[in-house]
């Protein structure tokens, strides 16, 4: 009877490690993934997923960036600026704005609104999000504000992230 319990415990431990491996690999492949998307992709229950996320976070394998209403999960090698960039480019409009800035160097609100076929208020909202995170900056030239990347280090990080 005791031998059977030991084998059962080993099986449970192997399954637990397998689940943790699945969670970690999913986070590695989809940086900035949110809890519900992670739950859907892994097929784990709430309790099991929460347990493994907590364990991985305590081990230092992942980190969670929590805001008012959402948590995003990243591998531990992702710094704050990369996390901000990843969060922004997971939004289609922000990704399109950044892509246009990369293509043209500097763009105006009017130019973005026409090219993306979105309202100026929508574009302005996303520009302000990008500015608040320190990803882009605006320079007034005459009556227009030209938006560009804040510095060249962001360009290096964006290249890899946008291609994925």
Image: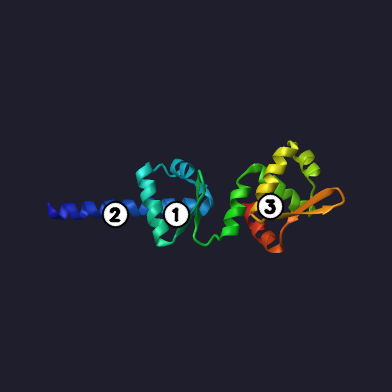
The picture places residue 42, in percent across and down from the top left corner, at 43, 44
Which disc is residue 7 wearing?
A: none
Report the residue that reaches farthest toward the right: 142
- The mark closer to the camera, 2 or 3, is 3
Q: Is residue 33 above or below residue 160?
A: above
What's the residue at 62%, 49% (across, down)? 88
Q: SS at mark 2?
A: helix
Label 3 and label 1: CA atoms lie apart by: 31 Å
Q: Which residue matches tag 1?
A: 24
Q: Which residue matches tag 3?
A: 131
Q: SS at mark 3?
A: helix
Q: Is residue 132 left or right of residue 102?
A: left
The picture places residue 106, in percent across and down from the top left corner, at 79, 53
Q: Is residue 110 left or right of residue 77?
A: right
Q: Is residue 126 above or below residue 137?
A: above
Name the quadrant containing residue 84: bottom right
The picture places residue 134, in percent across and down from the top left corner, at 66, 56
The answer to the question of whether label 1 and label 2 lie on touching residues, with beta carbons closer than 8 A, is no
Label 1 and label 2: CA atoms lie apart by: 16 Å
The answer to the question of whether label 3 and label 1 lie on touching residues, with beta carbons closer than 8 A, is no
Badge 3 density bin: few <14, some 14–19, many ≥20, Cα 10 Å:
some
Q: Which residue matches tag 2?
A: 13
Q: SS at mark 1?
A: helix
Which comes sooner in the sequence, label 2 or label 3?
2
- The mark closer to the camera, 3 or 1, is 3
Which comes sooner in the sequence, label 3 or label 1?
1
What's the residue at 22%, 51% (across, down)? 8
Residue 123 or 36: which is nearer the viewer?
Answer: 123
Name the quadrant containing residue 82: bottom right
Which comes sooner in the sequence, label 1 or label 2?
2
Q: How many numbered callouts?
A: 3
């Amino acid at each position: 009877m005791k031998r059977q319990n030991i084998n059962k415990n080993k099986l449970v431990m192997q399954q637990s490690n397998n689940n943790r491996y699945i969670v970690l690999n999913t986070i590695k492949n989809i940086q900035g993934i949110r809890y519900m998307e992670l739950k859907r992709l892994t097929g784990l229950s709430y309790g099991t997923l929460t347990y493994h996320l907590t364990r991985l976070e305590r081990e230092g394998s992942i980190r969670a960036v929590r805001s008012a209403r959402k948590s995003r999960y990243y591998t531990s090698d992702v710094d704050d600026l990369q996390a901000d960039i990843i969060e922004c480019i997971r939004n289609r409009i922000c990704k399109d704005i950044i892509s246009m800035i990369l293509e043209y160097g500097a763009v105006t609100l009017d130019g973005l609104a026409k090219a993306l076929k979105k309202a100026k208020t929508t574009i302005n909202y996303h520009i302000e999000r990008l500015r608040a995170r320190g990803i882009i900056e605006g320079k007034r030239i005459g009556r227009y504000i030209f938006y560009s990347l804040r510095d060249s280090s962001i360009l290096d990080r964006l290249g890899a992230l946008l291609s994925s």
